[in-house]
Amino acid sequence: MKLLSVTSECVPLVKTGGLADVAGALPEALKAEGIAVRTLLPGYRAVMAAVGKAKPVLDLPDCGGAPARVLAVKHAGLDLLILDAPHLFDRGAGIYLDETGKDWPDNIERFAALSRVAADIAKGDLKDWVPDVVHCHDWQAGLAPYFMKLDGAKAYSVMTIHNIAFQGIAPAQKRGALGIAPKDFIPGGVEYFGNISTLKAGLMFADALTTVSPTYAEELMTPEFGMGLDGVIKHRKDVLTGILNGIDQTVWSPETDPHISTYKTPRGKAANKAALQDEFGLPVSDGPLCVVVSRLTEQKGLDLLLEALPTLLARGGQLALLGSGDPALEKAFQSVDNPNVSVRIGYDEPLSHRMIAGGDAILVPSRFEPCGLTQLYGLRYGTLPLVALTGGLADTVIAATPASMAREVATGVQFSPVTALSLSNALSKLCDLYAQPRLWAKLQRNAMKQPVGWDSSAKAYADLYRGLAEGT
Ligand code: ADP
Ligand code: GLC
């Protein structure tokens, strides 16, 4: 089976969040299922520089107002198709944001062009390679299932929601320029409260929908989590599945991680913890060293952590945080004046490994979390996750209760509702558990045993693609 994956980011070439990790790791996992994946990615400046010489496979005389090409190249185990459209993607600053931190004004046009090319490939324009299924990720690829239907492409389409907060909204006046037919600018099509939503286009026109955890699939049907699209999701719930993300264990495994002092059992964490305390200038302490590696946004609930922090500190706990994003949150964390709190603002992949390896616990107090990857890293490294009971966090962490501990399956701490008070209680509970070393070690062993790789999820995607292709 041949699959085209359409994504705006992909590890190791370009990443702003978990989507890049998923798009980068899933192709290799699908290989084992007999599925050959080609990944269509924008030719951002950094991508063009990293891949070097690539073979032109398709000329596009008019791609969003100027000529462009599709290039084919193998890179880091990925079979890439790169949309080389300098007028859209050869820019400095960020892939979505300009140098002032604002969205590029033509973001909708840039990713509509990517989606248009995906549909061209689905239609057979590459001649020697026609996909059976096109897998579209988030709003950036949302118009692809629509264009495929408009063109009568034979390939099937799958639309995955990684985060419904980003909906690809554009004013109605852009309809013609984006290639949306007047007949489809209706509530049952791509129209969304008087605007265009490219995500809604994908949700309405794809043959199958997925999101990245079973709990988020349910949550999306509620007004609180659906963010205006809950009605659309409910309308299409028969074709929606929640499939959990995995992590790439060639990159994230304490036994082989080149960034840390490697270990096989939780005891091996001690050297990493000491090194991390040293690196962050934290004193040796009797309490748990908690780490956070995160975008600093409203979604991640870290403002609640600021409020609940005194509880952790009163119990001898420590916090090491790495993140960037909202300037107000960055400032708030940097202004915490306590010897047991240390903050690094920025994005630093090797440091994130050292933190996951050296921490006792990882905190993920998100208000919503479609899946979340850092709690999975935490499990793999015996760094116990303390998480909000929502989305993929609810599906991947087994809360320590008398029953789960008796069955030896508990792997962390969960809290609900997502408030500072309930987080504060959860931090107390974490400290209670940490104060019982044998119990804590047991939880760490349970965590490290939990499967967090791609095997079962890759199989679920493969079954979904095959089901579409075979009409079952
Ligand atoms: P989201 O995609 O919503 O940001 P995920 O948990 O799915 O959340 O994925 C976030 C990814 O980005 C993880 O791989 C995490 O380690 C990484 N990450 C986030 N912030 C940083 C940072 N400041 N430095 C290094 N890695 C980061
Ligand atoms: C989004 C979500 C995150 C998820 C990631 C990859 O960025 O916020 O929860 O893990 O996509 O699917």
Image: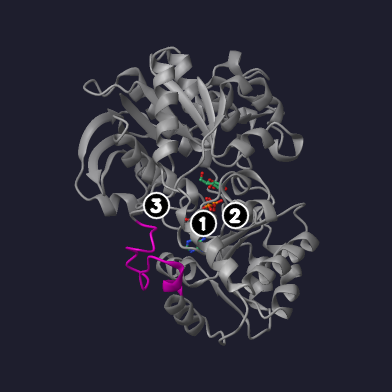
Residue holding disc 1:
446
Vertical order, 395 against 102 (above or below): above
Query: Does the magenta portion include 141?
Result: no
Q: Residue furthest front?
A: 406
Residue 369 seen in the current view: yes
Identify the residue at image location x=51%, y=57%.
447
Residue holding disc 2:
410
**What is the crowding at mark 1: few (fewer than 14 residues within 10 Å), some, or many (at least 20)?**
many
Vertical order, 101 against 131 (above or below): below
> Which numbered tag is attached to residue 34?
none
Identify the residue at image location x=42%, y=79%.
271
Identify the residue at image location x=44%, y=81%.
275
Tell me how the rendering is colored: one colour
Residue holding disc 3:
14
Vertical order, 209 against 166 (above or below): above
Q: CA distance from mark 1 to mark 2?
A: 7 Å
**What is the crowding at mark 2: few (fewer than 14 residues within 10 Å), some, or many (at least 20)?**
many
Q: Which amino acid lies under the numbered mark 1 shown in the image of this protein? A: Asn
> In front here: 432 or 35?
432
- Residue 199, position as x, y percentages in the image: 57, 32
Q: Which amino acid lies under the numbered mark 3 shown in the image of this protein? A: Val
Chain-order first, disc 1 or disc 3: 3
Nearer to us: label 2 or label 3: 2
Which residues fall within the magenta stretch? 251-269
Q: Quadrant of the N terminus?
A: top left
